[in-house]
Image: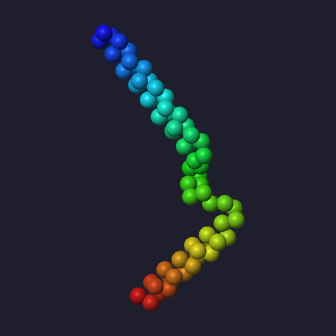
Amino acid sequence: MSELFRESFRVYDRQQSQAALAETRQRTSTYNPYNPMGYTEEDIPRLIKEVRAEMDAEKESRKAG
C-alpha cells in the first residue's frame, strides 16, 4: 500500500513539473529580452524625442539650480 502512495506521489510530481515547464516554455516563447517593453519600429522616433526632451529639461534644471 505504501508503495502505491509513493508511486502516486512520483507521478503527481512529474505531472506538476511537466505542467510548470510547459507554462514556462509558453511564456518565454514570446518574450524578447532585447525588447521587453514590446516597442515597435514606429515607436522609435517618439521615444528619441521623449529622451531628448528629458535630457534637455535636466540640463536646464542644472543651469537654473
**Residue 41, percent from left and from top:** 69, 61
**Residue 38 percent across, percent down from the top left:** 60, 57
User: Where does the image place residue 3, in percent across and percent down from the top left?
Assistant: 33, 10
State the residue at coordinates (35%, 12%).
4
Q: Is residue 33 above or below residue 41?
A: above
**Which residue extends farthest bottom?**
64
Of residues 64 and 37, the one drawn nearer to the viewer in this rendering: 37
- Which quadrant of the rendered structure holds the C terminus? bottom left
- For residue 35, which quarter of the picture? bottom right
**Is residue 24 or residue 1 the one in the foreground?**
1
Residue at figure coordinates x 49%, y 28% from the top left: 18
Q: Hey, which residue is sitting farthest front in the picture?
A: 1
Residue at image point 62% right, 75% down? 49
Q: Quadrant of residue 2?
A: top left
Total count of labels:
0
Q: Position of residue 62 (x, y in %)?
A: 45, 84
Q: Quadrant of the N terminus?
A: top left
Foreground of the two, 4 or 62: 4
Q: Residue furthest left?
A: 2
Q: Please name the residue shown 60% across and 42% down the image.
A: 29
**Relative height, residue 58 to residue 15 (above, below):** below
Q: How is the model colour-coded?
A: rainbow
